[in-house]
Image (spheres, helix red, strand yellow):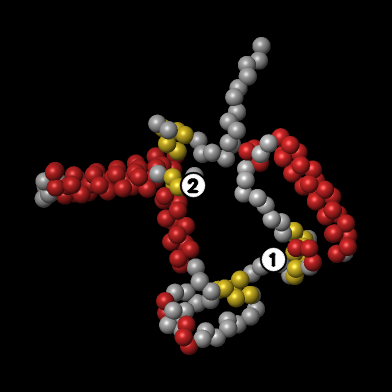
Amino acid sequence: MSQSVRIPADVDREDRILAGFTARQVLVMAVTALLLYGGWQVTRAVVPVIAYLVVAVPVGIAVSAVVIVRRDGVTLDRLLLTAIRQRLQPRRRVAAGQTPAEVPDWLANVASSADGPAPGRLELPATGVAEAGVVDLGSEGVALIAACSTVNFALRTPAEQEALTAAFGRYLHSLRACLTWLV
């Protein structure tokens, strides 16, 4: 006799390995704990335990909070790394193969290269935009620009869901005519 097994709907979710924490969270907290313990071992002959705890406890709480707290489903440590990576990227982008335009005098002190990285190359796969929001991607094909509502599909009534599905189907069927018109 076979036994049914529940498969979670969110297969992209990280596995929880210890007390509801993921392997990455456990690793970061364990490394922090080892570093704090090692710091205590090195300084215990010089620094009283209470003085060390005054420094170590807030550090441990801060690291745990950064690893555990989530904003929009992303942990704060990942958001912090993304912010640092974004800060190190060039602020101005120019199309690949072009030189950056001259910055006006009134904006020179804000946009100077001394404040940040030099303009970087902006490499887009698009080679052009045709009518009706069709983006030509060269040898990769084409892409279509579409506007979408922010209202969740599941929150709509069944009649609205049917109408939206039918309209979207008609829209997709019209793309064949649009794409043959482009070619």
Residue 170, relative to residue 17: is it above or below? below
- Assign the N terminus to one quadrant of the image: top right
The residue at the point 33 percent across, 47 percent down is: 63
**Tag 2 residue:** 72
Q: Identify which amino acid the numbered label 2 is placed on.
A: Asp
- The picture places residue 176, in percent across and down from the top left corner, at 86, 54
Instruction: Provide the secondary structure element on which disc 2 rests.
Output: loop
Q: Out of 56 and 112, give the one closest to the viewer.
A: 112
- The picture places residue 31, in percent across and down from the top left corner, at 34, 45
Q: Residue 12 carries which label?
A: none
Q: Out of 97 and 34, give the one closest to the viewer.
A: 97
Q: How crowded is mark 1: few (under 14 residues within 10 Å), some or many (20 or more)?
A: few
Residue 138 visible? The answer is: no
Q: Which mark is residue 125?
A: 1
Residue 111, relative to residue 19: is it above or below? below
Residue 144 visible? The answer is: yes
Q: Of the residues under marks 2 and 1, which one precedes in the sequence?
A: 2
Q: Which of marks 2 and 1 is in front?
A: 2
